[in-house]
Image (cartoon, rainbow, N blue to C red):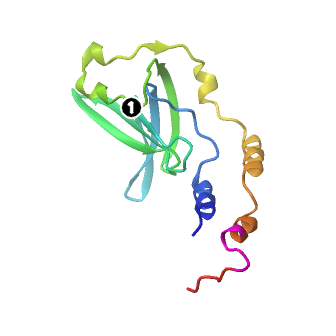
């Protein structure tokens, strides 16, 4: 299987638009939780201590909060269908991507300096028509990619 085919499958799994989350942000993640036959939305609010593979379909953020004096960390796949919405509440001024040093700190020393930003503009996603036009320009024709993966002279793999 060629890399181009894997790329197409991965792009198909991505959400059309997600907010630009960075390390040091305080976010509110709305996640679907299944209880029996019903779904409900659970909100997890905390500080983003890590952002992984931002442009990939496996993009992930790790969010940390302190609940009842105990530190709780949770990882969220940004393109998962169970993640309903991610809201950025405030931006922190940080100079690194992995803020693992916050695990050893508590109280005032665990606070991050705030940074001014337009909360409404950051949390507003572009219209779907605009996103569709950009994606259509980026994605090639699947038949062209399949032909480049298997040149005419190469034998087809048997199943």
Q: Mark 1 points at which residue?
A: 98
Residue lying farthest to the front in this orientation: 153
Q: Is residue 77 left or right of residue 12?
A: left
Secondary structure mostly seen in the magenta stretch: loop
| Rendered residue at 72%/48% (across/down) | 135
Instruction: Give above or below for 50 relative to 55.
Output: above
From the image, which quarter does the N terminus lie in?
A: bottom right
**For residue 125, what is the image quadrant?**
top right
Asked if the stretch drawn in magenta spans residue 93, the answer is no
User: Looking at the image, which is closer to me, 143 or 103?
Assistant: 143
100 sits left or right of 1 in the view:
left
In x, y percent, where is residue 51?
45, 36
Residue 133: where, in percent of width, then height? Answer: 78, 46
Question: Residue at 64% of width from left, 82% of height from top?
Answer: 156
Residue 5 rendering spot, x and y as whole percentages: 62, 64
Q: Nearer the viewer, residue 61 or 26?
A: 61
Residue displayed at 71% across by 80% down: 153
The image shows residue 112, relative to residue 103, as above or below, that is above
Spot the residue most to the bottom: 158
Q: In which quarter of the image is residue 48?
A: top left
Q: Residues within 10 Å of mark 1 (few under 14, many from 20)?
A: some
How many circles with numbers are drawn on the protein? 1
Where, quadrant-wise, is the C terminus in this rendering?
Answer: bottom right
Residue 113 is left or right of residue 124, and the answer is left
| Range shown magenta | 148-153
Q: Callout 1: helix, strand or loop? A: loop
């Amino acid at each position: 299987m060629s890399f181009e085919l894997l790329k197409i499958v991965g792009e198909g799994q991505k959400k059309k638009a997600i907010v630009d989350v960075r390390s040091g942000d305080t976010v509110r993640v709305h996640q679907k939780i299944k209880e029996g036959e019903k779904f409900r939305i659970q909100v997890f609010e905390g500080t983003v201590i890590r952002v992984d593979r931002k442009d990939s379909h496996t993009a992930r953020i790790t969010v940390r909060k302190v609940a009842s004096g105990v530190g709780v960390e949770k990882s969220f796949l940004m393109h998962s269908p169970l993640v309903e919405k991610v809201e950025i509440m405030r931006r922190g001024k940080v100079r690194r991507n992995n803020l693992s040093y916050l695990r050893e700190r508590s109280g005032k020393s665990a606070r991050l300096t705030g940074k001014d930003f337009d909360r409404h503009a950051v949390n507003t996603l572009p219209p779907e028509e605009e996103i569709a036009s950009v994606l259509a320009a980026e994605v090639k024709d699947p038949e062209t990619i399949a032909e480049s993966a298997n040149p005419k002279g190469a034998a087809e793999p048997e199943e």
